Amino acid sequence: MHLDPFSLYLHVPFCLQRCSYCDFFTMPLGEDRQGSFSPYLRALHAEIKAMAPMFAGRVLHTIFFGGGTPSLLEVEEMAAILEALRSTVPWHDEIEVTLEVNPETWTLEKARSFRSLGINRVSIGVQSLNPRALAMLTRNHDVQGARRCLDISRDAGFSKINLDFIWGRPELEIDDWRKELESILSWSPEHLSLYELILEPGTPMTRAVQRGELSLPSEDERLEMYRLTREVLADAGMEWYEISNFCRPGHECLHNMYTWQGFDYLGVGPGAHAFLGTPGFGRRRANPRNMPKYLGAPHEAPWVPRDAEDAVLEALLSGLRIREGFSLSLLRRRYGLDLNELLGKVAQPLVDIGHLSTSSERWSLSTGGAEVLDEIVKFLAARLPALPEDAQGTDATTA
Ligand code: SF4
């Protein structure tokens, strides 16, 4: 029996409309809801069934319904998915089950029903409290709708609620962001995911920026916005625990924490990713970002093995995102790799300037270090010594 945390991500790819910045794998729902959902749900159930052997000896610690817009699922559809999962894999007594919610799809009745089915955390896509910004992002809701969604979630008994926002948007000025942060805090959130806008190739927003119709804040302004965010939220008792995530103590998202810490997860649905840390140096797979392909073969995406270098660099890139850093014991236990032996000396300059802190058990970044995470990982990657071809850890051969 594996005792490490084990998670499942479930992708629901439909949205009522496409937001101008979005690069996720999503499809417009259109008028024929059942025509879209029925084949998708059939494939999803087939995939869960085919996955049963991968759950052997595992206990599920978290489930995350992401999208797309998973709050478009009807109560009966959600009940059937959860039932299929319950009959496939044992659930941890304190399992965290998160649902991403878009405001326009949420009613008190639905929220209560989902809560009674075992969903115990919701993540609401608010994105901005500025009506002009919501229009620019082509969101399908207004500020009042987002507030109603939060109130409904609280009234339905959800005590773990995240609000998602995007900063670094076109036309956002530092003072506006300060005021927006104050408005956000007036909603008394327990958890905030505050993502910097990334212009993904081919989105309408990227094209508008390329045509010069919109302009992004400069790099310096973005850095100032990020620092301001940390300060304003810390003053309100919401510290950062991951580069883009802030919460009151005890409200961390377990699903994401386990992923960043390097624990195993499976993914179901089109475009979903999975990662298993063993055997060898672990393996990854990604379901096709293409609905007909997924419907034709919902459990046939190939596993791609990692080598030792991938294992170390991925541990650094995601583990150092977390403020408390990451435990070196997982790399040691799984692969027999000791980060202090491999990189301790070359990392010393980063320790000396206060960006990195290292101990025999844990590596973590300071606040300043977190601002230059990518550069730090590049610095370490360029100095990585030759690594063994075979994993030597005590877990190395465990499937
Ligand atoms: S609702 Fe979310 S997933 Fe859907 S288009 Fe908008 S940003 Fe993308």
Image: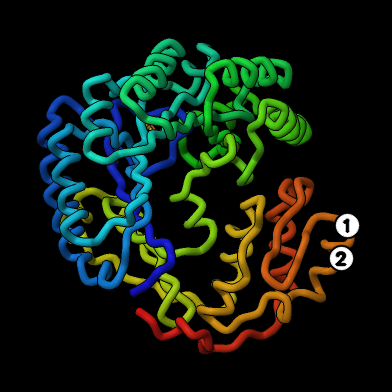
In the depicted structure, whether residue 236 falls above or below residue 132: below
- Callout 2 crowding tier (Cα within 10 Å): few <14, some 14–19, many ≥20: few
Name the element at disc 1.
loop
Whether disc 2's CB lies below 8 Å from ligand 1 is answered no
- Rounded to the nearest angstrom, the CA distance separating label 2 from label 1 is 6 Å
Residue 178: quadrant of the picture = top right
Name the kind of residue labelled 2 in the image. Answer: Pro
Q: Which residue corresponds to mark 1?
A: 353
Residue 171 seen anywhere in this rendered image of the structure: no
Residue 264 picture location, percent across and down: 42, 65
User: Residue at coordinates 73% horizontally, 55% vertically from top-left?
Assistant: 365
User: Residue at coordinates 40% horizontally, 69% vertically from top-left?
Assistant: 3
Residue situated furthest right in the rendering: 352
Q: Which residue corresponds to mark 2?
A: 349
Relative to residue 89, is residue 247 drawn left or right?
A: right
Q: Quadrant of the C terminus?
A: bottom left
